[in-house]
Image: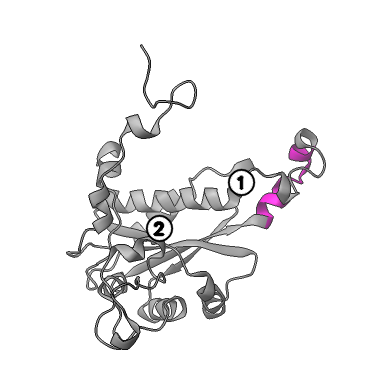
Amino acid sequence: MEFGEVVRRRRMVRNYDPDRPVPPEVVRRLLEHAIRAPSAGFSQGWGFLVLTEPADRARFWQATTPEARTPETTTPEASPPAAAGGATAPDVAAAGPAGEPPGWLAGMRRAPLIIVAHSCRQAYLDRYAEPDKARRLGAAAGSDERRWPIPYWHVDTGMAALLILLTAVDHGLGACFFGIPPERVAAYRAAFGVPERFTPVGAVTVGYPAPDRRSPSLRRGRRGLDEVVHYGRWGPAERSG
């Protein structure tokens, strides 16, 4: 598939065919492409947890998902829990019958593959304390988190996750990136033995797409270049002359 077509086709898929596993060679390709992401100082301070076995995936959802809400605890004004959708969760349907996950979560749970992307801050601080960086930046500059303009360990891991999303499209798969709620991170760590130095930046469900409901947020429309691009200086987003 042409790269431009891959980019145009990429979207968050929230329902999968549970009877079509992702071939092992494709799983490996997703990860091979992920580690081609750029990283500051070539620190490569990321780690990936790959869940393909049904028992492991079930443990993931149990650890990261709040208890299903009952009709008594669900109100029309309430938003769906953010466990398996992060910022995307409110875009989908609310909770289903008592004791059952909401429709969006049921579809996500059908994914035959989950990849959790983690960042490691210490890997970056250690890298920038090494002689080649320390000479250029100052002995303590790079190893002092306060001197970093933004947490590049998270940024680089996010770019690795994007490469997973794009590679999935190139292989005819669907994928969805989502966050683990802060209050569920401890349970997630305990369930999978994730060291404290690794922070789960987000998880990606991957599988062959099944019919799903497009996000209502798409009605907002995609912002055009004239709204978001500024040439020369920040001002009206248009190119002069």
- Which stretch did the figure color magenta? 122-134
Looking at the image, residue 189 lies above or below residue 145:
below
Looking at the image, residue 142 lies above or below residue 154:
above
Report, in whole angstroms, how far the alpha carbon at label 1 lies from the one at label 2: 30 Å
Helix, strand or loop status at disc 2 = helix
Q: Residue at (35%, 79%) from the top-left corner? A: 54
State which quarter of the image contains the C terminus: top left
Of 27 and 149, which appears nearest the observer?
A: 149
- The answer to whether residue 206 is visible is no
Which of marks 2 and 1 precedes in the sequence? 2
Residue extending farthest to the right is: 139
Q: Residue at (22%, 58%) from the top-left corner? A: 214
Q: Is residue 78 magenta?
A: no
Name the residue type under label 2: Arg
Where does label 1 land, which residue? 150
Where does label 2 land, which residue? 28
- Apparent side of residue 125 relative to residue 29 in the rendered image (left or right): right
Residue extending farthest to the top is: 241
- The answer to whether residue 155 is visible is yes
Model colouring: one colour
State which quarter of the image contains the N terminus: top left
What percent of the width, then of the height, locates residue 158? Answer: 48, 52
What percent of the width, then of the height, locates residue 126? Answer: 73, 51
- Apparent side of residue 56 relative to residue 6 in the rendered image (left or right): right
Helix, strand or loop status at disc 1 = loop
Name the residue type under label 1: Ile
